[in-house]
Amino acid sequence: NNANNDIQDYFLLKLNYNPVTNVITNVLSIAIDTSYQKTTNTVIKGNLMFTFVNGQLNKFDLTTGVKTNLGLYNGINGQLFGFNGESYFSTGDVAKKWTL
């Protein structure tokens, strides 16, 4: 939500972190599709953001803001997350690698 500067969750900031100077700088702000729902079930790969909410897998292009529905998986609940540059999905104790 634009770093808490807007009430709408679909306004995002792209930030850059410099670990040498410990400085975070604003790269750009973008408005993505207004149907975006804020969630921790999110993976960012390049300029694409993938979300999984209530069984709905979506892809958001962080350059254009366009949303693409990738599928509805009724009855499947779990956590989508990234670790060491890879994407994973877990419905319990063991996470499985996903290719997004």
Image (cartoon, grey):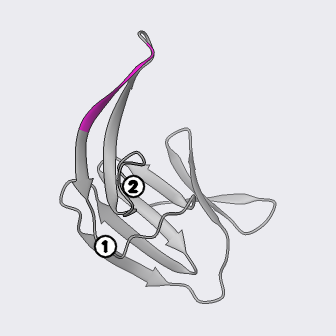
In this rendered view, identify the residue nearer to me: 15 or 43. 15
**What residue appears at the point 55 percent right and 38 percent down from the top-left corner?**
84
Give the quadrant of the N terminus: bottom left
Tell me, yes or no, whether the highlighted magenta stretch contains residue 78.
no
Q: Is residue 62 left or right of residue 100?
A: left
23 with respect to 33 (left or right): right
Q: Is residue 48 above or below residue 51?
A: above
Residue under label 2: 1
User: Residue 46 location in percent, x, y?
Assistant: 33, 46
Q: Residue furthest top?
A: 20
Q: Nearer the viewer, residue 14 or 88?
A: 14
When the figure is inspected, residue 34 is found, relative to residue 14, above or below; the finding is: below
Residue with the most extreme right position: 93
- What residue range appears in magenta? 22-27
Magenta part, dominant SS: strand
Q: Nearer the viewer, residue 49 or 87?
A: 49
Given the image, on which type of amino acid does mark 2 rest?
Answer: Asn
Q: Position of residue 70 (x, y in %)?
A: 39, 77
> 10 Å neighbourhood of mark 1: few (<14), some, or many (≥20)?
few
Percent from the top left, x then y, of residue 67? 29, 72
Task: Give the percent coordinates (x, y) of residue 58.
Answer: 41, 72
Residue furthest to the left? 64
Judging from the image, what secondary structure is the residue with disc 2 in? loop
CA gap, disc 1 to disc 2?
A: 11 Å
**What label does residue 34 carry, if any?**
1
The amino acid at mark 1 is Thr
> Residue at 58% of width from left, 54% of height from top?
81
